[in-house]
Amino acid sequence: MRKLFCFYVVLHLLTLTVLQVFGLTTESMEGQTLPQAPPPPMAHLDRIPLGTLSEMTDASRSVGFPSVSWTTPVVTVAFNGGDPELYALIEATASEWTSNGGRLKFSFRLGDGSFRKWSDSDIARSADLRIGFFTDADRDGYWSTVGTYARRVNAGEATMNFGDLGTTLSQYYKGNNHTAWLASYAHTTILHEFGHAIGLNHEHFHPSCQTDLKLAEIVSYLTGPPNNWQREQAMYNMDAKTYFATVSAKPSFTPTIDQASVMLYSFSDDFYKSGRASPCRPSGPLHYATGLSIEDRHYYAANYGSDH
Ligand SMILES: [Zn+2]
């Protein structure tokens, strides 16, 4: 299996975050009014709890994985909180990654068709990926561990969290408002976090983007009020050197930044040295990806044997 680390992971999330933080609203496209960007996620986007980050990076917990990519054909998923309609929405969205062929499958359900669950009191891991909808100060927000590093997290803890998405998506249940769902930030968020779960890192780790980001200002922004991130959390998410010192994956880069990637963050133009002309700036009218880009799919294909 090749370890192709596409930094093509979508920049769009970051874009979303920044847009929202700076009060920008969704623009109309082709005369249609698209859903407004959701509340500011930058405050919590990818802010992995420090305890989970510590477990994830504790080498003594290594279970012998050669890379962050899953080598098992089935990755099991369990939920804590939420409801079956929400689970089905997440299941369908996550499957956008695996629906292109390849050997990786997510398994959300037990043999009787019901969704797999986990609880805080579990001693044995009920699933490879454990999704929560926690909104307490430590765990709030949208985040995921990276690839097989999920195996290092304790059984009674989440490896992925969708915070308020546990209570805010009912208008999209059972296929309702499907077009709006596909354009929504929540849909992108789920794609983004499952991107991390299969081993992708942020597209803004691309060298051309790292040199254009005002890293010190971004870290200062995230560690200050009202976000109040810890510096480790900010550096893990924003600084490629820190990330690759933390996650033992070999970075490799595509020639140019993928501005359509779901792994690309959206920042305020003020956070780019080249401002609005930044190559890190997400493309598209919403300033975040609403689906997997070509390079996102290439990453999946390179790591999981997709034909596409
Ligand atoms: Zn992320």
Image: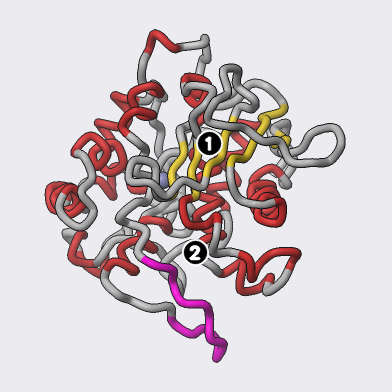
- For label 1, the SS is helix
What type of secondary structure mainly makes up the magenta span?
loop
Is residue 45 visible to the viewer in this orientation of the structure?
yes
Describe residue 25's horizontal placement relative to residue 168 as left or right.
Answer: left
Quarter in which the N terminus is drawn: top right
Tag 1 residue:
197
185 versus 61 height, above or below: below
- Judge whether residue 31 is colored magenta: yes
Label 2 secondary element: helix
- Earlier along the polypeptide chain: callout 2 or callout 1? 2
- Quadrant in which the C terminus is drawn: top right
Q: Give the residue type that dot 2 points to.
A: Tyr
Question: Residue at coordinates 54% horizontally, 67% vertically from top-left?
Answer: 184
Give the quadrant of residue 138: top left
Residues 229 and 66: in front is 229
- Packing grade of label 2 (10 A; few <14, some 14-19, many >=20) is many
Residue position for label 2: 185
> Does residue 50 lie above or below 174 as drawn?
above
Residue 307 numbered tag? none
Instruction: Tell me residue 293's x, y (percent).
Output: 55, 55
Outermost residue to the front? 121
Q: Are marks 2 and 1 in contact (CB under 8 Å)?
A: no
What stretch of residues is rendered in magenta? 27-39
Residue at 40%, 38% (x, y): give it.
253
Ligand 1 closer than 8 Å to label 1 CB = no
Which class describes the residues within 10 Å of circle 1: few (<14), some (14-19), or many (20+)?
Answer: many
**Which residue is painted at 12% across and 47% down in the image?**
216
